[in-house]
Image: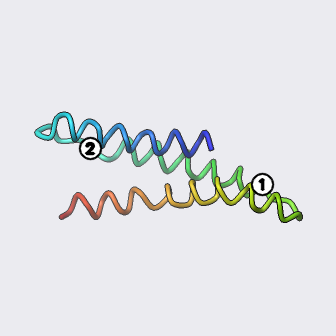
Amino acid sequence: MMLATLGWGAWWCVLLLHRLAPEREVSLLVPSIVSTTSAALGFLVALLTLRARRTWIVFALVPLLANGTLLLVPLLADEFVRR
């Protein structure tokens, strides 16, 4: 979850900067690299924590979903910027 928080934090910093200084053009390259790298590592760690018991699956679903959705954010942000 720390890796997912790092990745989401990068995007929230970009949104905060856009909100505070809308005239400033913000590149999406750095937050995309930070979020994709941390999400991929976090997703891998979450997969490695899966065990055969149902309770482990429930515990692992939270970081799997957090990191899985974070992997899609650069695609959505790129689509949003194009509009």
Residue placed furthest toward the left: 23
Instruction: Report the disc number at residue 62.
Output: none
Residue 11, how many percent across, how many down?
38, 44
Q: Is residue 2 left or right of residue 8?
A: right
The first of marks 2 and 1 along the sequence is 2
Q: Is residue 53 left or right of residue 39?
A: right
Q: Is residue 52 left or right of residue 16?
A: right
- Choose top left, top right, bottom left or bottom right for residue 58: bottom right
- Choose top left, top right, bottom left or bottom right for residue 67: bottom right
Q: Residues within 10 Å of mark 2 (few under 14, many from 20)?
A: few
The vertical placement of 48 against 83, above or below, is above
At x 23%, y 57%, the residue is 81
Colour scheme of the picture: rainbow
The amino acid marked with disc number 2 is Ser
- Are discs 2 and 1 less than 8 Å apart at CB? no
At x 59%, y 60%, the residue is 65
